Image: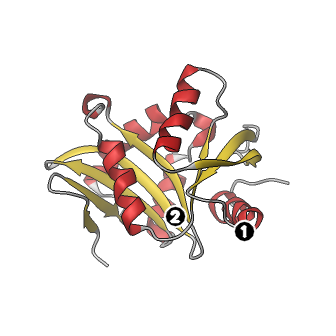
Amino acid sequence: MSNIQNVNDMMNLIRITKSDDDRLERLIPLYKAAFPLEERRDIDELKRMIREKPEMYFNAIECDGELAGLFIYWDLKDFYYMEHLAVFESMRNLRIGQQVLDYIALHLDGPRLLEVEPATDEMTTRRVNYYKRNGYEILDTTFIQPSYREDKDAGLLWIMGNGQPERLREFTERIKQVIYRDHYKK
């Protein structure tokens, strides 16, 4: 499979598989800025996973040849887990995130799950509504996300998906085991 997936005439998803990729170095500040400490990995851990986890797809988003953002998803065989999507501030409002969601709706066949913060304020409500407009529904409001870091607490998140999978509990347990297992403490 090619590491470049053409999304449309102006945008590409480029899978990063090497931790010394120049694009990754330029995306790390976005990763840090877009996601709170408890919702992201240590950078050395992220680089290790890019090298060692073939089920993890760390994608650079390029728009007209310019680095625009990042999109991380996992192929967990029975379903896809969409972990992180972020666009550089200078590239926002160009519908880049929308184009990524349109692409995955067409090319990632089967259940797709993601986590969102509970809708408690204007920003989190807007984010939930954005995913709803894109065909996702709230499936679970009781999901406890294990922390990516030992010194941080687990947090309540909502699971959204593109339909109600019969095996939702199994899938959320697999997310905990595969995505967070290195950090998850009982």
Residue 164, located in which quarter of the rendered image?
A: bottom right
Residue 166, located in which quarter of the rendered image?
A: bottom right
Name the residue carrying label 2. 74
Q: In the rendered view, would you say 64 is above or below 123?
A: below
Left or right: residue 3 compared with residue 38: left
Name the residue carrying label 1. 166
The residue positioned 53% from the left and 43% from the top of the image is 132
Q: Quadrant of the C terminus?
A: bottom right
Q: In the rendered view, would you say 69 is above or below 37?
A: below
Mark 2 is on which residue type? Trp
Q: Percent position (x, y) of residue 15?
A: 33, 63
Left or right: residue 138 compared with residue 40: right
Looking at the image, which is closer to me, 91 or 47? 91
Q: Secondary structure at mark 2?
A: strand
Depth check, mark 1 against mark 2: the one in front is: 1
The residue positioned 69% from the left and 41% from the top of the image is 157
Mark 1 is on which residue type? Glu
Looking at the image, which is closer to me, 75 or 127? 127
The tag earlier along the polypeptide, 1 or 2, is 2
The residue positioned 66% from the left and 24% from the top of the image is 120
Looking at the image, which is closer to me, 17 or 108? 108
Q: Percent position (x, y) of residue 154?
A: 75, 41
Name the outermost residue toward the top: 122
Q: How many marks?
A: 2
Q: In the rendered view, would you say 121 is above or below 170?
A: above
User: Is the residue marked by circle 2 packed among few (<14), some (14-19), or many (20+) residues within 10 Å?
Assistant: many
User: Is the residue marked by circle 1 packed among few (<14), some (14-19), or many (20+) residues within 10 Å?
Assistant: few
Q: Percent position (x, y) of residue 181?
A: 70, 61
Please, which colouring scheme is shown? Answer: secondary structure
